[in-house]
Image (cartoon, grey):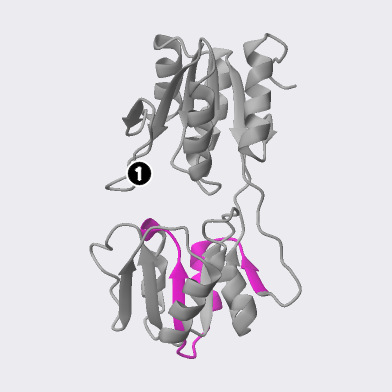
């Protein structure tokens, strides 16, 4: 059984590793290529897009994919929509692996917004020291708020840099602990954090550190994704796949 996993997340890599040992399973992990030097994946990997839903549909059909798994980032809504459409048009089994979002806990001060542009506006007019905990492709809207001082952390360097007078760039790859993120926030005298509700453990350190320091978090809500069969954890996804392997699962169940 040929399985295509659309990845880029820790869960995608873990799922690929667990499914690789299944008898008769042939795994292909696909990465979008947004990170210049992705981690070693351990399974056959392709990098790059497919050319929209139509291109993904053709790839699934041409490669005789039997199971399509969307394990992309929770905010990669375009590929998730394309994957759902490709699965429907190809008639293959489809699963969306969606990690649970973080929950607002006692002591958290979250200001929830719908888009990154709304997050930039929510910072207000008064100058602030801001930690942008976002992907490097998401930070451009903050050029409209140049009065703030920004700390930007990303896996790859920001090139070109933000067109603002005061920005510091840190390149680092998670996971990040609460202690490390608290030290980072204190070192740069951060007053507010901008984050997506990515969920998972790897990047939760900043949320816990913000709680401990009493800092507000401007939280960008998740996009609405297609209503598809889903799993919240790798183990749930493996169990679902095992049903497919034995012919006990069908799309929509």
Where is residue 25 shown, x and y percent of the image? 50, 14
Residues packed near mark 1 inside 10 Å, few (<14), some (14 to 19) or many (20 plus)? few
Is residue 129 magenta-colored? yes
Magenta segment: does it hold 94?
no
Q: Is residue 16 left or right of residue 30?
A: right
Looking at the image, which is closer to me, 250 or 107?
Answer: 107
Q: Seen from this angle, which residue lies furthest left?
A: 160
Residue 130 horizontal/vertical position (percent):
46, 79
Query: Which residue is rendered at x = 32% and y = 33% of the image?
Result: 47
Q: Nearer the viewer, residue 246 or 59?
A: 246
**Residue at the bottom extreme?**
126
Whether residue 219 is visible to the viewer of this picture, yes or no, is yes
**Quick check: 134 left or right of 246?**
left
| Residue that numbered label 1 is attached to | 39
Instruction: Classify residue 161 by image quadrant.
Output: bottom left
In the displayed structure, 215 sits above or below 50; it is below
Please provide percent x and percent y for residue 98: 62, 41
Q: Residue at coordinates 28% horizontally, 83% vertically from top-left?
A: 165
Count every numbered label the image shows and give the total. 1
For the magenta stretch, what is the residue range? Answer: 110-137
Q: Secondary structure at mark 1?
A: loop
The image quadrant where one finds the C terminus is top right
Q: Could you say which is closer to the camera, residue 179 or residue 243?
A: 179
What is the x, y in percent for residue 231? 67, 35
Res 227 seen here: no
């Amino acid at each position: 059984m040929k399985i295509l996993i659309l990845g880029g997340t820790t869960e995608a890599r873990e799922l690929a590793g667990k499914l690789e040992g299944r008898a008769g399973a042939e795994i292909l992990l696909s990465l979008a290529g947004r990170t210049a030097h992705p981690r070693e994946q351990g399974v056959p990997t392709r990098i790059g897009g497919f050319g929209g839903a139509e291109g993904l549909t053709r790839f699934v059909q041409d490669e005789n994919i039997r199971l399509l798994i969307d394990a992309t980032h929770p905010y990669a809504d375009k590929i998730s929509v394309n994957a759902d459409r490709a699965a429907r048009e190809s008639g293959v089994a489809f699963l969306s692996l969606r990690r649970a979002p973080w929950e607002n806990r006692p002591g958290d001060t979250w200001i929830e917004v719908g888009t990154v542009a709304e997050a930039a506006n929510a910072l207000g007019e008064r100058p602030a020291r801001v930690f942008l905990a976002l992907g490097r492709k998401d930070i451009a809207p903050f050029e409209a708020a140049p009065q703030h001082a920004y700390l930007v952390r990303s896996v790859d360097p920001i090139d070109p840099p933000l067109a603002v007078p005061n920005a510091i760039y840190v390149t680092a790859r998670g996971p990040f602990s609460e202690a490390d993120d608290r030290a980072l926030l204190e070192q740069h005298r951060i007053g507010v954090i901008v984050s997506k509700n990515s969920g998972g453990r790897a990047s939760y350190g900043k949320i816990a550190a913000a709680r401990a320091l009493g800092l507000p978090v401007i939280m960008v809500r998740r996009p609405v994704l297609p209503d598809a069969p889903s799993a919240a954890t790798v183990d749930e996804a493996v169990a679902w796949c095992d049903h497919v392997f034995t012919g006990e699962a069908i799309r929509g169940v």
